[in-house]
Image (spheres, rainbow, N blue to C red):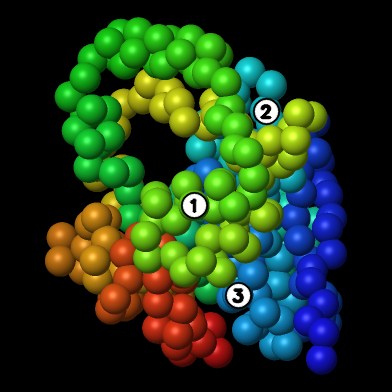
C-alpha cells in the first residue's frame, strides 16, 4: 500500500509565514515534534509514520529553517522561537487544551522554555538531547564580559553577512556532505534528509534551506542555575532521552534531573546526539513506553 505523506500547512507569527506538516488523524490526541538547529520538520518522518495511526502528529519548520520564512534582522533569539511555538499550539489545539511534545536538541530547549512559562499547556514532554547549551558556550557566557560578547557578536554577524550559502552540484553531493557530518546516517537517511533540506538555486545548484544567520549567538549573561530553576516549573511527566555516545551532559549524574517534579531519564545505547536516527528502534521503544 502506498504511504501517503503529510500535508503542508502555514501559520503566521510576528509577520513571518511559518510552515508545518500535518500527518492527519485529526481526531487522535495531538503530538508535536520539534526539530533541532539547522534541521527541518521532515527529519521526524520515520517517527511520524510510526505514530500517525495513534496520534495527530504535527511537525513544524522553525523560523529560518525548512520551508518557513527567514527572519528579517536575524531574529533568532530563543524567546522568538518560544513565541512561535505558543502561536502554533493555539493553532493546533486552541488557547487552553494541553498537548504532548517531543523536541530534539535546540527544539527541546525551546519546548523547555515554553513548558516552564506555560506549564499547564503540556500534557507530556520528551526532551531529546536538550539539556542546556554546549559546555563551551556555558563557559563563554559565564566568564566573558558583556562588551566582549557584543563585539564578538557584531564581528560574527558581519562575517555571516558576507558569507555565501554553499552550493552543491547535485542532491547526491549535498547528501554526501551530510553523511560526512554524521557518519552514523545510512545512505537512505542522508538522501531523505537532504531532499527535504535543500532548495534548488536558479543556476541548477542546491543549497541548504536554513538561514546562516541562525549560526550567530547573541550576547547574554548565563547562569547555570537558571536552567535548573526553570525545570522546577515543568510539571508534566517529562522524559529526558540521551544517547550513550553523546557529547551532551548527563542530567541524572549531575543532579539536574532532580529539578523536574515528574522527570525520568533513559539512555539509548549505540546512539550519539541524533538519537532517533542513530538507533531508531531504541528511540521508539523508549518513546512508546512513555507516551503510550
Circles 3 and 1: CB atoms closer than 8 Å: no
- Residue beneath label 3, please? 46
Q: Total number of numbered labels?
A: 3
Which residue is at 15% across, 60% downward?
A: 254
Q: Give 177 or 57, whichever is nearer the viewer.
A: 177
Q: Which mark is residue 71?
A: 2
Q: Give 79 or 205, whichever is nearer the viewer.
A: 205
Q: Earlier in the sequence, mark 3 or mark 1?
A: 3
Is residue 51 depicted above or below 178 in this figure? below
Left or right placement of residue 178 versus residue 43 in this view: left
Which residue is at 30% across, 8% downward?
A: 147
Provide residue 190's location: percent of width, then percent of height.
Answer: 53, 61
Q: Which of the 4 image quadrants contains residue 14? A: top right
Q: Earlier in the sequence, mark 3 or mark 2?
A: 3
Q: Locate the C terminus by quadrant.
A: bottom right
Q: Callout 2: helix, strand or loop?
A: loop
| C-alpha span from label 3 to label 2 | 29 Å
Q: Locate the N terminus by quadrant.
A: bottom right
**How dense is the environment of label 3, judged by Cα within 10 Å: few (below 14), some, or many (20 and up)?**
some
**How dense is the environment of label 1, judged by Cα within 10 Å: few (below 14), some, or many (20 and up)?**
some
Provide residue 197's location: percent of width, then percent of height.
Answer: 64, 49
Left or right placement of residue 160 versus residue 232 in this view: right
| C-alpha span from label 1 to label 2 | 29 Å
Provide residue 230's location: percent of width, then percent of height.
Answer: 38, 51
Circles 3 and 2: CB atoms closer than 8 Å: no
| C-alpha span from label 3 to label 1 | 20 Å
- Residue beneath label 1, please? 176
Instruction: Check the image and name the residue furthest to the front.
Output: 169
Q: Earlier in the sequence, mark 1 or mark 2?
A: 2
Is residue 214 depicted above or below 145 in this figure? below
Q: Give 99 or 17, whichever is nearer the viewer.
A: 17
Is residue 291 depicted above or below 158 in this figure? below
Amino acid at each position: 500500500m502506498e504511504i501517503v505523506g503529510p500535508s503542508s500547512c502555514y501559520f503566521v507569527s510576528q509577520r513571518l509565514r511559518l510552515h508545518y506538516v500535518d500527518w492527519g488523524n485529526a481526531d487522535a490526541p495531538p503530538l508535536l515534534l520539534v526539530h533541532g538547529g539547522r534541521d527541518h520538520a521532515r527529519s521526524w518522518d520515520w517517527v511520524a509514520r510510526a505514530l500517525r495511526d495513534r496520534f495527530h502528529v504535527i511537525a513544524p519548520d522553525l523560523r529560518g529553517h525548512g520551508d518557513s520564512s527567514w527572519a528579517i534582522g536575524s531574529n533568532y533569539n530563543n524567546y522568538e522561537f518560544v513565541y512561535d511555538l505558543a502561536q502554533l499550539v493555539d493553532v493546533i489545539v486552541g488557547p487552553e487544551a494541553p498537548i504532548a511534545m517531543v523536541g530534539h536538541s535546540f527544539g527541546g530547549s525551546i519546548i523547555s522554555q515554553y513548558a516552564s512559562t506555560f506549564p499547564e499547556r503540556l500534557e507530556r514532554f520528551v526532551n531529546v538531547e536538550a539539556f542546556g547549551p554546549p559546555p563551551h558556550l556555558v563557559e563563554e557566557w559565564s566568564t566573558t564580559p558583556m562588551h566582549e560578547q557584543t563585539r564578538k557578536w557584531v564581528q560574527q554577524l558581519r562575517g555571516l553577512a558576507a558569507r555565501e550559502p554553499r552550493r552543491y552540484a547535485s542532491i547526491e553531493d549535498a547528501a554526501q556532505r551530510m553523511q560526512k557530518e554524521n557518519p552514523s546516517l545510512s545512505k537512505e537517511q542522508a538522501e531523505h534528509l537532504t531532499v527535504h533540506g535543500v532548495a534548488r538555486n536558479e543556476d541548477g545548484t542546491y543549497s541548504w534551506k536554513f538561514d546562516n544567520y541562525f549560526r550567530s549567538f547573541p550576547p547574554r549573561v548565563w547562569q547555570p542555575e537558571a536552567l535548573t530553576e526553570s525545570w522546577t516549573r515543568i510539571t508534566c511527566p517529562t522524559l529526558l532521552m540521551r544517547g550513550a555516545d553523546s557529547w551532551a551532559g548527563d542530567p541524572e549524574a549531575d543532579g539536574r534531573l532532580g529539578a523536574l517534579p515528574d522527570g525520568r531519564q533513559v539512555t539509548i545505547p549505540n546512539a550519539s546526539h541524533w538519537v532517533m536516527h542513530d538507533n531508531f528502534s531504541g528511540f521508539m521503544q523508549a518513546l512508546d513506553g512513555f507516551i503510550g
